[in-house]
């Protein structure tokens, strides 16, 4: 069962991805590391929370 902490963690990671993507569009070439580094765990936590929500 996905707890609220898992959902909040996924949301926080997506905000980090959004900030890194914005930074990348403003010209920071190394911001792709933040997009990938936070995007993979954000996707994993989102999938985990979604699958656990559907099991209920």
Image (cartoon, rainbow, N blue to C red):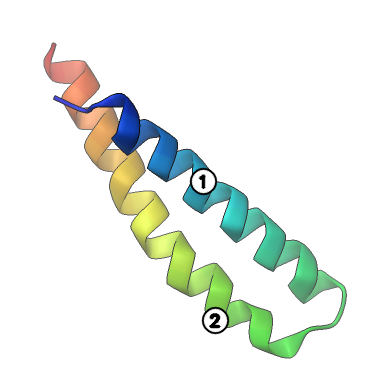
Q: Between tags 1 and 2, which lies in front? A: 1
Mark sitting earlier along the chain (1/2): 1
How crowded pointer 2 is (Cα within 10 Å; few <14, some 14-19, many 20+) is rated as some
Question: What residue appears at the point 24 percent right and 26 percent down from the top-left corner?
Answer: 3
- Residue at 27% x, 32% y: name it: 49
Q: Is residue 14 above or below residue 51?
A: below
* Quadrant in the picture for residue 28: bottom right
User: Could you tell me residue 45's position as x and y percent?
Assistant: 31, 45
| 5, above or below 10, in the image | above
Give the alpha-carbon distance from disc 1 to disc 2, as whole Å: 17 Å
Between 37 and 51, the residue placed more toward the observer is 37
Residue at image point 41% right, 52% down: 42
SS assignment at label 1: helix
Secondary structure of the residue carrying numbered label 2: helix
Contact (CB < 8 A) between labels 1 and 2?
A: no
Left or right side of 42 for 52: left
Q: Which mark is residue 12?
A: 1
Image quadrant occupied by the N terminus: top left
Give x and y (percent) for residue 35.
56, 69
Looking at the rendering, in which quadrant would you find the C terminus?
Answer: top left
Left or right placement of residue 35 versus residue 23 in this view:
left
Left or right placement of residue 26 versus residue 47 in this view = right
Task: Give neighbour class at mark 1: few <14, some 14-19, many 20+ (Cα, 10 Å).
Answer: some
Q: Which residue is mark 2?
A: 33
């Amino acid at each position: 069962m996905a707890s609220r902490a898992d959902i909040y963690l996924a949301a926080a990671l997506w905000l980090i991805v959004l900030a890194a993507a914005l930074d990348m569009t403003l010209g920071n070439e190394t911001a792709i590391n933040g997009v990938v580094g936070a995007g993979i765990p954000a996707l994993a936590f989102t999938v985990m929370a979604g699958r656990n929500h559907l099991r209920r």
